[in-house]
Image (spheres, grey):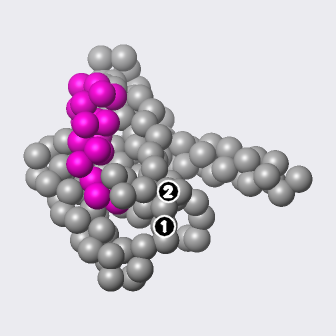
Amino acid sequence: MQTLYFQSRNLLMKKIMTFVLLVGFAKAFGQSSKDSFVIRPDLLRQYYSVMLTEGDHRDQDSALAAKIQEQHLANITRLVNEGKVLVAGPFLDDISWKGFFIFDMDSKEAIEKELAQDKAISSGRLKYEIHPWMTVKRKVDFK
């Protein structure tokens, strides 16, 4: 019963996250009214969303966990500086979802190679799901 509750809660959270992202992107493009924003096929581009979730090996001592986190953040910094990640950040509530990326890369396989270099993933502290995702091909400026 409790497993069904968590599955339906996770599904609801995914739907809410999708809605929030779509609304956020629409508002972030600076449209003055809801009628002025039009999505056309020539404006769309495929990106990849990556959801980071709790891994199966989160039993490291605090010193090792801190070192893994430091390496994880260094990897994210590298990916952003190389233009491969457009958005990255943690979820701040206490759920199994731990973080989220938007990758601007050509394939799921290329992203998997990048994620394999992340110490938080290779150590088992985090797992990930990759999903192709489409939106308007302008970058969002979060102010």
Asked if residue 130 is positioned above or below residue 75 in the image, the reply reads above
Q: Residue at x 33, y 82 (%)?
A: 63
Q: Residue at x 83, y 57 (%)?
A: 2
Give the extent of the magenta segment: 103-120
Residue at the left extreme of this rendering? 82
Residue beneath disc 1:
58
Label 2 sits on what residue type?
Gly
- Helix, strand or loop at mark 2: loop
Circles 2 and 1: CB atoms closer than 8 Å: yes
Asked if residue 57 is positioned above or below residue 66 in the image, the reply reads above
Label 1 sits on what residue type?
Arg
Residue at the top extreme of this rendering? 41
Cα distance in 3D space between marks 2 and 1: 6 Å
- Residue 72 in percent (x, y) is at 27, 62
Mark sitting on residue 55: 2
- Helix, strand or loop at mark 1: loop
Residue 44 vs residue 97, the one in the foreground: 97
- Residue 111 in percent (x, y) is at 28, 36
Residue 36 vs residue 79, the one in the foreground: 79
- Residue 96 visible in the snapshot: yes
- Residue 136 in percent (x, y) is at 33, 32
Magenta-colored stretch includes residue 116: yes
Mark sitting on residue 99: none
